[in-house]
Amino acid sequence: MEKFYITKGVYETLDMRIITYIQTLIKSMDIEVDYLQVFSISGNVLIHTQEVPEYIKEYTLSKEYRDEKLFSIKTEEENSNYWTLMLAHEY
């Protein structure tokens, strides 16, 4: 089971519903999942991308949010895998 961690910046900036939604999007991807997932929020639009294999999907959110760019990075260790969600400027 993969774990998800969020940085303090994400915790203090984003609504928990968006954080949970991003986690769900990663878990439900139907193609090979790259170690780096990029999420851009602009108003009520969330754009989810990855480079390899190329992937881009746009979602309409139920309300408007502050514009943000986020990275979710997968770390694979011997006994566990986990994702860290961070604001772009925290990278």
Image (cartoon, rainbow, N blue to C red):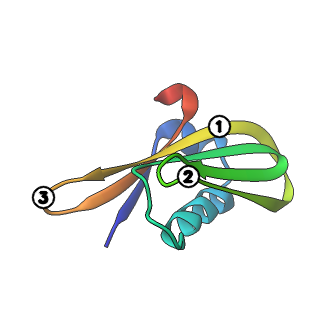
Q: Is residue 18 above or below residue 84?
A: below
* Circle 3: residue type: Glu
**Which residue is labeled 1 in the image?**
69
Closer to viewer: mark 2 or mark 3: 2
Q: Name the side, left or right, on which 2 lies relative to 91.
A: left
Callout 1: SS: strand
Residue at the spot x=58%, y=41% of the render? 70
- Give the percent coordinates (x, y) of residue 71: 52, 42
Query: Which quadrant holds residue 41?
Result: top right
**Which residue is labeled 2 in the image?**
54
* Circle 2: residue type: Glu
Q: Do the residues labelled 1 and 2 touch (CB within 8 Å)?
A: no
Q: Residue 57 carries which label?
A: none
In three-dimensional space, the C-alpha distance between marks 3 and 1, rounded to whole angstroms, equals 30 Å
- Mark 3 or mark 1, earlier in chain: 1
Q: Is residue 34 above or below residue 43?
A: below
Closer to viewer: mark 1 or mark 2: 2
**Which residue is labeled 3 in the image?**
78
Q: In this view, does 15 lie above or below 90?
A: below
- Give the percent coordinates (x, y) of residue 32: 44, 64
Q: Name the side, left or right, on which 65 lies relative to 73.
A: right
* Circle 1: residue type: Lys
Q: Which of 78 and 11 is in front in this view?
A: 78
